[in-house]
C-alpha cells in the first residue's frame, strides 16, 4: 500500500496537518505515532485561544485524532526508526518491529522532549503549577513564590527571565553543574536565591499543585509555582538526518519559510522539531501550512478527478 502522505508524529503539529490533509477527501493519509511527546505530558495549556480555563494536551490530542479519523485519516502506533528515499522517489519508513510503510510525501512532526530527571511528584504538576516555557506561562507565576528546578547556566538563564515576573524566586541547581561567574554574580545582584543541592522529590496537593520542593539534604522549600530548565533537550530530528535534510546548528530541521518543505523534495517539517518558537499554537499553524502545501504537490502527482457535474434546471444558464 502506498500512502499519499505519511505524518510521523501525532502531536499538535501532526494532528493539525492530518485534519488539513484529510479534509481534501482525496488523499490516503496515515499518521504514525510512538505515543508520548510534549503534548501528552502537559496537563494544562493556558494560552490557547478559546480555553481561558486551560485545556489538557491529552484532551486536545484525543479530539484531534477523532477529527482526523472522521476525515478518513488512518492511525498507527509505531516508532519509525529508519527513513529512506527510494530511486522511484517514494519514501520507505521502517518501524521499531520492522514493519514497512511507503508514501509519496512525508511530514516529520516528531517534536522535541524536555530533559528532566525523574523526580517523584513532578509529572502530575506539569502544566498545572509547574511550567517549562516562560513565553507560555510566565503569566502564571506573577508575584508568586516560585521555585525553579534546573541545571547550570541553562537554569540561570531561565531564572533571569522569570525574575521579571516575580520577586520571590529560588533557583535550585539540581545537577550542581558549574555556573559562569557572570551568572553567579547576576543571580545575587537580582536577589534570586541560589541553591546547589540535588532535589529528592516534590510534595503536592491533589497531585497537581506544587507545595514544597524537598532537597536530598532534607530542606523543604515552599512553592506556589515551579518551573523546570535542565537544558540539552533532545531534538527528534534523526529521521531528517537519515534522509539528508539540512539541520540547523541546534539540530532543529530547516525548511522553506513559506511552504515548510525541507531541502529534500517532498519532505515537510512542522512543530517543535522545526526551527522556531516551541509553542502549541505555532505547532498547529505549522501543521496546517505543511498540509496545504503537501496537497498542492499531491494534486500534481495525482491529478484530482472532478466529481460529475450536476444537471441544472434548464432555466438556469
Ligand atoms: C510541561 C509542558 C508545558 C507546556 N506548556 C505550554 C503552554 O502552556 N503553551 C504552549 O503553547 N506550549 C506549551 N508547551 C509546548 C507544547 O507542548 C509543544 O510546543 C507542542 O506539544 C509541540 O507539538 P509537536 O506536535 O511539535 O510535538 P509533540 O506534541 O511533542 O508531538 C510529537 C509526537 O511525535 C511522536 N514521535 C516522535 N518521534 C517519533 C518517531 N520516530 N516515530 C513515531 N512517532 C514519533 C511523539 O511520540 C509525539 O507524540 C509545553 C510543553 C511542556 C512539556
Image (cartoon, helix red, strand yellow):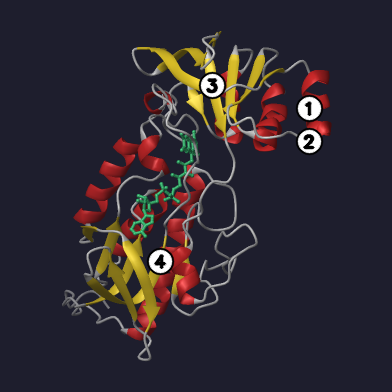
Circle 1 — which element? helix
Between discs 4 and 1, the one toward the N terminus: 4
Please state the horizontal and vertical placement of residue 99, each as a whole percent of the image. Answer: 21, 70
**Quick one: quadrant of the N terminus?**
bottom left
The residue at which mark 2 appears reads as: 180
- How many labels, in total? 4
- Asked whether 83 or 119 is in front, the reply is 119
- Name the residue rendered at 72%, 18% in the picture: 192
Residue furthest front as drawn: 217
- When the figure is inspected, residue 222 is found, relative to residue 40, above or below; the finding is above
Please state the horizontal and vertical placement of residue 82, each as a whole percent of the image. Answer: 36, 70
Q: Is residue 292 visible?
A: yes
Circle 2 — which element? loop
Mark number displayed over residue 171: none
Q: Quarter of the image holding residue 309?
A: bottom left
- Name the residue rendered at 78%, 27% in the picture: 184
Mark number displayed over residue 226: 3
Instruction: Estimate the spatial distance between the alpha carbons at disc 4 and disc 2, rounded to whole Å.
Output: 40 Å
Instruction: Estimate the spatial distance between the alpha carbons at disc 3 and disc 1, rounded to whole Å.
Output: 21 Å
Mark number displayed over residue 184: 1
Whether ligand 1 has any atom under 8 Å from the Cβ at mark 1 is answered as: no
Circle 3 — which element? strand
Which of discs 3 and 4 lies nearer the camera? The answer is 3
Instruction: Estimate the spatial distance between the alpha carbons at disc 3 and disc 2, rounded to whole Å.
Output: 23 Å
Which of discs 3 and 2 lies nearer the camera? The answer is 2
The residue at which mark 4 appears reads as: 107
Amino acid at each position: 500500500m502506498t500512502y499519499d502522505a505519511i505524518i510521523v508524529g501525532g502531536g499538535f503539529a501532526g494532528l493539525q496537518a492530518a485534519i488539513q490533509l484529510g479534509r481534501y477527501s482525496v488523499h490516503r493519509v496515515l499518521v504514525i505515532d510512538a505515543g508520548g511527546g510534549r503534548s501528552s505530558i502537559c496537563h494544562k495549556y493556558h494560552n490557547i485561544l478559546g480555553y481561558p480555563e486551560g485545556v489538557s494536551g491529552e484532551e486536545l490530542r484525543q479530539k484531534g485524532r477523532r477529527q482526523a479519523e472522521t476525515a478518513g485519516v488512518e492511525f498507527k502506533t509505531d516508532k519509525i526508526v529508519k527513513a529512506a528515499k527510494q530511486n522511484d522517489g517514494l519514501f520507505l519508513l521502517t518501524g521499531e518491529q520492522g514493519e514497512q510503510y511507503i508514501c509519496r510525501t512525508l511530514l516529520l512532526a516528531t517534536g522535541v522532549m524536555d530533559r528532566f530527571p525523574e523526580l517523584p511528584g513532578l509529572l502530575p504538576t506539569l502544566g498545572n503549577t509547574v511550567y517549562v516555557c516562560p513565553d507560555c506561562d510566565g503569566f502564571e507565576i506573577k508575584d508568586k513564590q516560585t521555585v525553579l528546578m534546573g541545571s547550570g547556566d541553562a537554569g540561570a538563564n531561565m531564572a533571569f527571565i522569570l525574575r521579571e515576573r516575580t520577586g520571590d524566586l529560588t533557583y535550585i541547581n539540581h545537577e550542581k553543574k558549574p555556573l559562569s561567574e557572570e551568572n553567579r554574580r547576576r543571580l545575587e545582584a537580582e536577589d534570586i536565591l541560589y541553591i546547589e543541592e540535588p532535589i529528592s522529590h516534590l510534595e503536592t496537593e491533589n497531585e497537581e499543585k506544587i507545595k514544597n520542593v524537598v532537597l536530598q539534604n532534607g530542606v523543604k522549600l515552599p512553592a506556589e509555582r515551579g518551573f523546570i530548565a535542565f537544558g540539552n533537550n533532545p531534538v527528534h530530528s534523526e529521521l531528517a538526518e537519515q534522509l539528508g535534510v539540512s539541520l540547523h546548528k541546534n539540530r532543529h530541521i530547516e525548511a522553506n519559510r513559506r511552504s515548510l518543505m525541507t531541502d529534500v523534495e517532498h519532505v515537510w517539517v512542522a512543530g517543535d522539531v522545526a526551527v522556531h518558537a516551541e509553542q502549541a499554537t505555532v505547532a498547529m499553524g505549522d501543521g496546517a501550512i505543511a498540509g496545504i502545501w503537501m496537497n498542492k504537490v499531491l494534486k500534481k502527482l495525482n491529478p484530482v478527478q472532478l466529481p460529475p457535474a450536476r444537471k441544472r434546471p434548464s432555466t438556469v444558464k
